[in-house]
Image: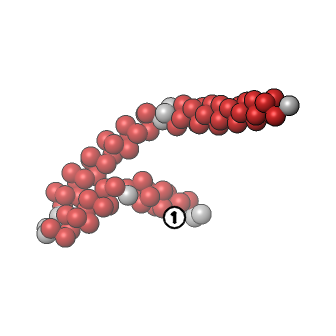
């Protein structure tokens, strides 16, 4: 009787692991489908970095411009919501 219990317990652990692994892989597939938005963000980052670095008059402003280039989507959404009155 204990042998059946051990096999049953091992099978339950395997089934739990298998379902967890399957859900993890399905989640990864969903995340990987956003290549176009990554390209748009990357091109926007390059353009913003070039713009802000060209406008910088000191090293500190260049660092600040680089940070602004990383965060440009947040500034964009903030301004759009401000203009919409939200």
Q: How many marks?
A: 1
> Quadrant of the rendered structure where residue 26 is?
top right
Q: Is residue 30 visible?
A: no
Left or right: 27 in relation to 7: left
In the depicted structure, whether residue 72 falls above or below residue 57: above
Q: Is residue 68 visible?
A: yes
Q: Quadrant of the C terminus?
A: bottom right
Residue 38 at what x, y percent from top left? 40, 39
> Quadrant of the rendered structure where residue 39 is?
top left
What residue lies at 13% left-to-right and 69% top-to-bottom? 58
What residue lies at 38% left-to-right and 58% top-to-bottom? 71
Left or right: 9 in relation to 82: right
For the rendered model, the colour scheme is secondary structure
Residue at the outermost right position = 1
Residue 22 at what x, y percent from top left? 63, 31
What residue lies at 48% left-to-right and 61% top-to-bottom? 78
Residue in the foreground of this view, choosing between 52 and 15: 15
In the depicted structure, whether residue 23 falls above or below residue 70: above
Residue 24 at what x, y percent from top left? 59, 36
What residue lies at 46% left-to-right and 61% top-to-bottom? 79
Residue 82 at what x, y percent from top left? 51, 64
Question: Could you say whether the residue bearing mark 1 is in a helix, strand or loop?
Answer: helix
Pointer 1: residues within 10 angstroms few (<14), some, or many (20+)? few
Left or right: 44 in relation to 1: left
Left or right: 8 in relation to 29: right
Q: Quadrant of the N terminus?
A: top right
> Quadrant of the rendered structure where residue 2 is?
top right
Residue on which disc 1 sits: 82
Residue in the foreground of this view, choosing between 85 and 39: 39
Residue in the foreground of this view, choosing between 3 and 59: 3
In the depicted structure, whether residue 72 falls above or below residue 15: below
């Amino acid at each position: 009787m204990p042998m059946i219990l051990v096999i049953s317990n091992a099978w339950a652990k395997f089934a739990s692991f298998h379902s967890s692994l399957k859900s993890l892989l399905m989640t990864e597939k969903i995340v990987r489908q956003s290549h176009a938005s990554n390209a748009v963000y990357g091109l926007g980052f390059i353009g913003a970095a070039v713009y802000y670095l060209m406008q910088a008059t000191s090293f500190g402003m260049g660092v600040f411009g680089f940070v602004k280039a990383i965060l440009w989507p947040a500034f964009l959404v903030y301004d759009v919501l401000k203009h919409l009155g939200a």
